[in-house]
Amino acid sequence: MRIGHGYDVHRLVADRPLILGGVDISWERGLLGHSDADVLTHAVMDALLGAAGLWDIGHAFPDDDPAYAGADSLVLLDRVMEMLRSRGYRVGNVDATVLAQRPKLAPYIPQMRANLAARMGVDPDRVNVKATTEEGLGFTGAGEGMAAHAVALLEER
Ligand code: MG
C-alpha cells in the first residue's frame, strides 16, 4: 500500500463556473484557473500521483500547455488513472475536504463522490468528500478562494 497527500487552491472570481468534483454548481462566482479549476479534483489527483511517486499535476499537465486550457478535470483524472493502472496500482480509498465559506456544498457531495468514484473505478463508499468553512478566517473565510485537501491510498495489484 502507498499513501499520498494533495492540496490545492483556486481564486474565486465573477463570470466563471463553479465546478467541484465534476459537479457544475450554480453560484454567483466560480474558480479561476487554466483548466476548469476544479480544486477538489486537483487535490485528489495530486494525492493519487503523490502516492505513486509521480510528482504532481503541474508536471503531468503543465498549465502553460494550451492542450489543457479549459480542460475538464475529470478527463485529467482519467489520464492519472491510466498512469496508475499502467504501473499496477488501483485505488484503495480517498478522503478529501473542501474549504469554502459559501455556498453550502452538502447537497452536491453525493454527486461529487459518484463522479470521482466512477473515474477511479471504485465504489462511492471508497471516496469520501467533506466540506467545511474556516469560520470566516483567512482567504477561504473572506470568499477570496477555495482550497481542498485530499489523501489517497493506493494498492498494488
Ligand atoms: Mg489546481
Image: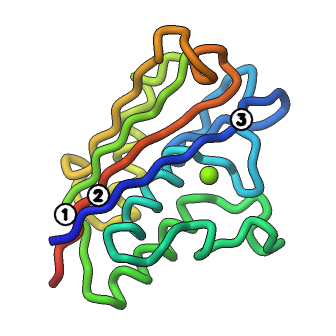
Image coordinates for residue 29, horizontal then vertical, percent: 74, 25
Q: Is residue 33 left or right of residue 76?
A: right
Q: Is residue 102 above or below residue 149?
A: above
**At numbered mark 2, what does the secondary structure look like: helix, strand or loop?**
strand
Q: Amino acid at mark 2?
A: Ala
Foreground: disc 1 or disc 3 = 3
Q: Quadrant of residue 23?
A: top right
Image quarter hosting the C terminus: bottom left
Which of discs 1 and 2 lies nearer the camera? The answer is 2
Front-most of residues 45 and 26: 45
Residue 149 location, quadrant: top left
Label 3 SS: strand
Q: Which residue is mark 3?
A: 11
Q: Are marks 1 and 2 in contact (CB under 8 Å)?
A: yes
Quote the CA–CA distance across marks 2 and 3: 24 Å
Examine the rendering and report whether any part of residue 148 can be seen: yes
If you read the primary sequence from the N terminus, does the residue marked by circle 2 or circle 3 appear first?
A: 3
At 39% from the left edge and 33% from the top edge, which residue is drawn? 109
Q: Could you tell me residue 144's position as x and y percent?
A: 70, 24
Which residue position is annotated with label 2? 152
Q: Nearer the viewer, residue 3 or 38?
A: 3
User: Is residue 96 placed above or below 99 in the rendered structure?
Assistant: below
The tag earlier along the polypeptide, 1 or 2, is 1
